Amino acid sequence: MADFTVREYAFISIAYEGCPDSSLNHAYIPEKAFEHLCELSASFSKHGAKVFELAGRRKLKLDQYVGVIETPCGTRIEILPKHVEIDTDDEESVRRKERNLLQSMLSVSLHLSSREVGVASLNCFKNQPLNEWIITQFLASFERLVQRGLRFDYNRVQEEQKFLRGQLQHVKYMRQPAAKKHIFPIEHDVYEVNRPENRLIRAALEVVCKKTKDASNWKLAQELRLMTNEIPKSLNVKQDFKNWLSVRLLAHYKDIKPWTELILGEKMPVSTQGDWRGMSLLFPMEKLFENYVAYHLRLNLIRWNVKTQISSQHICLYEEKPIFRLRPDIHIQHRETNQIIVLDTKWKLINQNDRAGRFGLKDSDIQQMFAYSHYYLKHSSQVILIYPQVTTQFDNKLEFKFNVESGEALLRVIPFHLDEPKKVLDYLLD
């Protein structure tokens, strides 16, 4: 079946005879795949996730979720972030840039090592769809793991043999009929490769062998499958992930764990309901953008402590107990002066020239920042809203004063250049 690539807020319609070619802003997919998306939309809505919006009987509109969806009929839909205007670049160039951005954001959100996040690694796979890129990263990590050596573990085995080994189970032996007195029920430990981490990796490899459409990925997956044929597949994925050890002896398993979680669906922010899951991976752009900004702030603000999602303040008391937490996205504090700045990230386009429309800023966002300023800073420092810089409509900071007595109570709205993250420092610390 065909693969489709679209962007946030794109439309998805049922293909019909003579329909236009699919593009980044509008895809025409088979009817069976469209019906599956409608079922997913109803499932997501029950769990409070708005991934699709019905725009008629034969059309869906995407929301702020990116990733890949695979339907039972084999159709794959890749959803990319929308941060490049097609007017300025051809569609293939836009697809490449946005795929590269999504891979970078995903690498940051998965807390991968610098080797995995490196530019060379990303450039190597920038032309691959997201699902194939994930498979490539998983197989590369698995190959390195096999080269370094898989970890073995002792497992308790109970069996019957004609010889003694380990511990004899006396009660069972005494109850045996006379004809079986030459058979010994024994219990002993076997040093083998059957351990939770290896079982999960093997289960993920089986999924990869079935799902990959890339020839080089398929070849490597089959080679690894033969090399690790003695490893049993995990029969209880959730329990095995709970038993995954993060100890020094398993340090070289660290790189492969996030890819294994993604492939087996354990790290999927939006889970599909029912028997069919395929290799569907959906991520909220709001969260990816927050993680991406926080990562680059930690990387460049050497003299500042950068924390995310702190919740030390509450907006109300109920029976003298705090309730309704205030949870800013990012909290930074200078290590020498102890100056504090509270930041929130918003994945939304605003226009610095639209004075009549209040620049596209929402009342609820401004009220939220005022609460942060009051409870976390006592109006003694600034709070900052960070929006993506996608077009020239927002390439400079906006500055507001809160209507309070303190003159230091400032709200600044600054752009974050997605392709040049260091530029944010020019607006943040000036």
Image (cartoon, grey):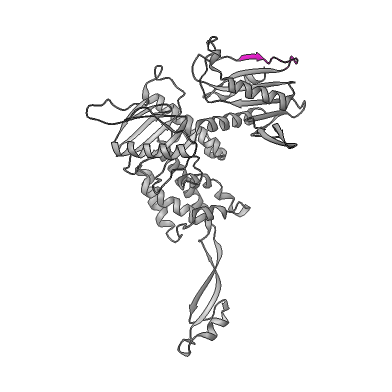
Q: In the rendered image, which quarter contains the C terminus?
A: top right
Q: Which residues are magenta?
A: 398-408
| Quarter location, residue 376 | top right
Q: Quadrant of the N terminus?
A: top left
Between 19 and 313, the one nearer to me in the picture: 313
Name the spot of residue 7 as percent of width and height, x first: 41, 28
Residue that extends furthest to the left in the rendered view of this protein: 17
The residue at the far front in this view is 319
Asked which quadrant contains residue 164, the reply is bottom right
Q: Is residue 49 above or below residue 397?
A: below
Q: Position of residue 147 (x, y in %)?
A: 49, 52
Q: Name which residue lies at 45% across and 25% down.
A: 82
Closer to us: 141 or 297: 297
From this viewpoint, is residue 95 visible?
Answer: yes
Q: Is residue 399 magenta?
A: yes
Position in image of residue 113 (x %, y %): 57, 40
Q: Residue furthest bottom?
A: 178
Q: Would residue 169 appear left or right of 124 to someone viewing this image?
A: right
Q: Position of residue 289 (x, y in %)?
A: 54, 29
Q: Residue furthest right?
A: 337
Tell me which residue sits at (52%, 14%) in the image. 351
Q: Nearer the viewer, residue 255 or 55?
A: 55
Residue 327 image-quadrant placement: top right
Whether 351 is drawn above or below 154: the answer is above
Image height check: is 202 above or below 345? below
Q: On the rendered structure, is 103 left or right of 30?
A: right
